[in-house]
């Protein structure tokens, strides 16, 4: 992997970001509106390298590894491309077209969240800083 | 001839003569079909010295080679000729169900000239055709006429119908197939109206086609249909229609607001997006022939001021043209406006563009109550738009109806004010994608498009999004939308590809999944053309060149490859704030790469000879 020592690092960074953005009411509200169980599947970069986010039923929960139920939406990509994506340095349409991201399930919610990626990236970078991984922040 | 039938129907409505003509196979090799083949015929047979609505004007309906092959997205057709709206080359693509039926009749197209003495309809049954009296349908809306024709002839007859707007020669009237699918742009409904041709019906008795390699095609067809259905974009389009990503458009600054005075209206994102339409008004999904994407919508608005019975729903362009563009985020109103436009037979893009211009003119005091016959025009007043303005336009009723019935450019010229805030290229109102937010490459291809500002003349919109790449031919650009880097380079392939798409009559949503080897396999198994990628792309560029030559004959030059001042101003807000397109920079590079004369706007003699257009070269470079 280009950016991570191991798959656990990638998962930690994504979980940290979700932890931070829980304080942003607007983002939380936007995510709840998606009303899906989303699985970010980075397992091509290592076993267990995955994060799930459950936005169903007006709740918002997240965790590492396999999702608690069958996901409504699965996005499969490498942990390195996930890092680029959360950093707003990967054009998601291009990545999907070039099969760097594989999507399974309804992408309606994803389309609504996509414009928020700039704001999400701010939390992602803050999370990296908090974790002492400033060197991983993409310029 | 394999694949194509090689036959077209020539119909002269003045003399009531109908003949079947066999075209040379070379025409298909060089110009494919659809709008390319139409351009070839227009170049040879078109008149450049007459009014676009004169009886001698050609109205051409042309299929592509894949019509009727049960392949998703591949059964569109092209309608072409001199645009009544712009006065130069125009073509307009339509899905629906007409193309396959015509193909099964053993015909690749129709070339209609003359003017019938009274309201008429053209009835085609296999290769036999008759002209019938259509007086009883004249003056009636498309919905009623379509329904009456189906009752009279049978549901299996495929219909093309014009509405009252076309009869009254509104310059941006449409032709509706099956009461739903519009040949929308450039005003070819108007040309049908001028010919007193209310409708065309087609019905075949068999579905036999002579293909070069039926077994090879069958394998490919099944594979492509699966891949097209499985693609994420197809699923998104199926689920929420063509407005599925309106949210993304709003936040990138691609969605124009109030006649392009703004690029950002945040509330529009949720209010107008495709998933909202699905949740609030969708009753069922629809599709063009053999398409398993099914991006068409059927909607019903059960209550409120814009109540609409179940029927065809609005697409993205209509939602924005009757939404943010005219200052509204009322989705029900867009459903209603779209339905009214369909019934009257009006292009929603040019109508929305012309109304947006009029609203701004009224706000600025350039258009007064005296000019409008007492009708005030205010942003977001959809009640007036739907109940007063659209019917007035369709009937050319009063000063306002007459003013707007010829489009925004003509209206500004007649008024002597407001030309600087018209939004068009070559007289065609721009579609609902603002290049200041959507991407600068799209500004270039809007300006270069032979028919005028158009987002489907070529796939640049998708290329800049990152949704298209063709690594097999080295077309692998990573483009930043608001940048000039590699835009002219990308446009060279994009315009050629657009010409191929619109000549093969393949939907841009479906053919996103078709790779270069797939395209070649399609052409080769259907027509036996034996093409390689270079042959195919050369045909694309040749078609692009030929349409420019046609415009040259109409007197257009490189100066006409332009955008209006409003489109070239810096964006005011949102992601597009400060974003300004330097068109001249991209244009100069594009001409250079395309071997186009930067004054005349046509290919150099050498380029034409290199593209096997020696005869055409002699015509424009005599001596």
Image (cartoon, coloured by chain):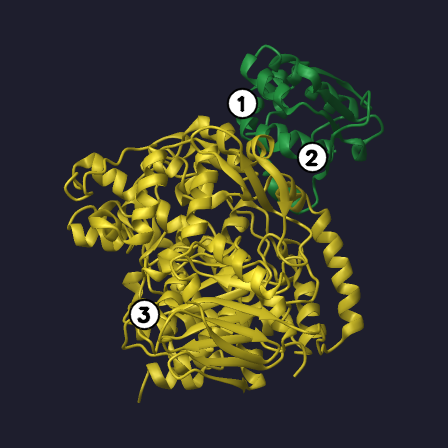
Chain colours: A green, B yellow
Foreground of the two, B201 or B90: B201
In this rendering, the label closer to the viewer, 1 or 3: 3
Q: What number is the disc on residue A119?
A: 1
Q: Residue at x 36, y 45 (%)?
A: B352
Q: Position of residue B282 (x, y in %)?
A: 59, 37
Q: Quadrant of the C terminus of chain B?
A: bottom left
Q: Position of residue B87 (x, y in %)?
A: 31, 66
Q: CA distance from mark 2 to mark 1?
A: 23 Å
Q: CA distance from mark 2 to mark 3?
A: 48 Å
Residue B22 falls left or right of residue B437: right
| Quarter residue A48 falls in | top right
Labels 2 and 3 in the same subunit: no
Q: Which residue in the protein does label 3 denote?
A: B53
Q: Mark 1 and mark 3 in contact? Answer it, CB < 8 Å.
A: no
Q: CA distance from mark 1 to mark 3?
A: 54 Å
Q: Residue at x 76, y 64 (%)?
A: B220
Chain letter for the residue marked with disc 3 in the picture: B
Q: What number is the disc on residue B132?
A: none
Chain letter for the residue marked with disc 1 in the picture: A
Q: At numbered mark 2, what does the secondary structure look like: helix, strand or loop?
A: loop
Q: Which residue in the protein does label 2 denote?
A: A106
């Amino acid at each position: 992997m280009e950016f991570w020592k191991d798959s656990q690092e990638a998962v930690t960074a994504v979980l940290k970001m979700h932890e931070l953005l829980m304080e942003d009411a607007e983002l939380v509200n936007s995510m709840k509106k998606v009303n899906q169980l989303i699985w970010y599947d980075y397992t091509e970069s290592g076993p267990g390298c995955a994060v799930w986010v459950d936005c169903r039923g007006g709740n918002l929960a997240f965790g590492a590894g396999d999702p608690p139920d069958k996901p409504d939406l699965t996005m499969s990509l490498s942990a390195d491309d996930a890092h680029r994506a959360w950093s707003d340095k990967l054009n998601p349409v291009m990545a999907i077209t070039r099969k760097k991201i594989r999507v399974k399930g309804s992408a309606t919610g994803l389309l609504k969240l996509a414009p928020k990626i700039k704001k999400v990236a701010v939390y992602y970078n803050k999370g990296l800083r908090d974790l002492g991984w400033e060197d991983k922040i993409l310029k | 001839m394999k694949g194509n039938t090689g036959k077209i129907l020539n119909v002269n409505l003045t003399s009531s003569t109908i003949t079947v003509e066999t075209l040379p196979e070379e025409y298909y090799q060089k110009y494919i079909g659809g709008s390319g083949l139409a351009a070839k015929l227009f170049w040879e047979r078109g008149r450049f010295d007459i009014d676009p609505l004169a009886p001698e004007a050609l109205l051409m309906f042309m299929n592509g080679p894949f019509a009727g092959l049960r392949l998703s997205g591949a059964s569109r057709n092209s309608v072409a000729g001199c645009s009544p709206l712009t006065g130069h080359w125009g073509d307009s693509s339509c899905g629906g169900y007409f193309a396959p039926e015509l193909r099964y009749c053993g015909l690749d197209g129709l070339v209609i000239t003359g003017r019938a003495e009274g309201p008429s309809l053209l009835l085609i049954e296999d290769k036999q055709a008759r002209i019938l009296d259509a007086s009883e349908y004249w003056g009636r809306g498309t919905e009623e006429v379509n329904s009456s024709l189906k009752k009279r002839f049978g549901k299996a007859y495929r219909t093309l119908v014009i509405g009252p707007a076309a009869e009254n020669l509104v310059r941006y009237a449409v032709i509706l197939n099956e009461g739903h699918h519009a040949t929308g742009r450039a005003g070819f409904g108007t040309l049908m109206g001028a010919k007193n041709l209310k409708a065309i019906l087609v019905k075949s008795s068999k579905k036999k086609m002579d293909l070069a390699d039926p077994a090879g095609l069958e394998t490919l067809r099944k594979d492509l249909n699966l891949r097209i259905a499985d693609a994420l974009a197809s699923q998104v389009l199926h689920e929420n229609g063509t407005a599925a990503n309106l949210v993304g458009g709003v936040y990138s600054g691609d969605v124009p607001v109030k006649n392009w005075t703004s690029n950002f209206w945040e509330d529009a994102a949720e209010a107008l997006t495709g998933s909202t339409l699905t949740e609030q008004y969708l009753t069922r999904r629809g599709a063009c022939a053999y398409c398993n994407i099914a991006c068409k919508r059927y909607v019903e608005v059960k209550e409120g001021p814009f109540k609409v019975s179940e029927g065809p729903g609005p697409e993205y362009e209509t939602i924005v043209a009757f939404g943010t563009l005219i200052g509204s985020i009322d989705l029900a109103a867009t459903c209603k406006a779209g339905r009214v436009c369909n019934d009257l037979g009006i292009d929603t893009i040019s109508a929305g563009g012309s109304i947006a211009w009029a609203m701004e003119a009224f706000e600025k005091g350039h258009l007064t109550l005296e000019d409008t016959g007492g009708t005030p025009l205010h942003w977001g007043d959809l009640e007036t738009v739907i109940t007063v303005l659209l019917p007035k336009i369709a009937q050319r009723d009063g000063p306002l109806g007459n003013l707007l019935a010829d489009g925004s450019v003509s209206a500004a010229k007649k008024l002597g004010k407001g030309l600087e805030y018209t939004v068009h290229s070559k007289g065609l109102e721009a579609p609902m994608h603002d290049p200041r937010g959507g991407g600068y490459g799209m500004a270039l291809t809007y300006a270069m498009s032979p028919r005028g500002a158009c987002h489907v003349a070529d796939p640049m919109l998708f290329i800049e999004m990152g949704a298209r790449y063709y690594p097999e031919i080295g077309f692998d650009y990573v483009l930043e939308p608001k940048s000039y880097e590699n835009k002219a380079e990308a446009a060279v392939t994009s315009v050629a590809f657009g010409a191929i798409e619109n000549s093969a009559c393949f939907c841009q949503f479906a053919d996103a999944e078709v790779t270069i080897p797939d395209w070649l396999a399609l052409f080769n198994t259907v027509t036996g053309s034996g093409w390689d990628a270079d042959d195919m792309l050369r045909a694309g560029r040749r078609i692009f060149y030929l349409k420019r030559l046609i415009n040259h004959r109409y007197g257009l030059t490189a100066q006409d490859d332009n955008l209006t001042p409003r489109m070239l101003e810096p964006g005011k807000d949102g992601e597009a704030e400060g974003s300004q397109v330097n068109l001249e920079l991209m244009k100069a590079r594009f001409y250079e790469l395309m071997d186009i004369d930067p004054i005349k706007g046509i290919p150099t003699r050498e380029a034409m000879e290199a593209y096997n257009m020696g005869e055409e070269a002699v015509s424009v470079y005599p001596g």
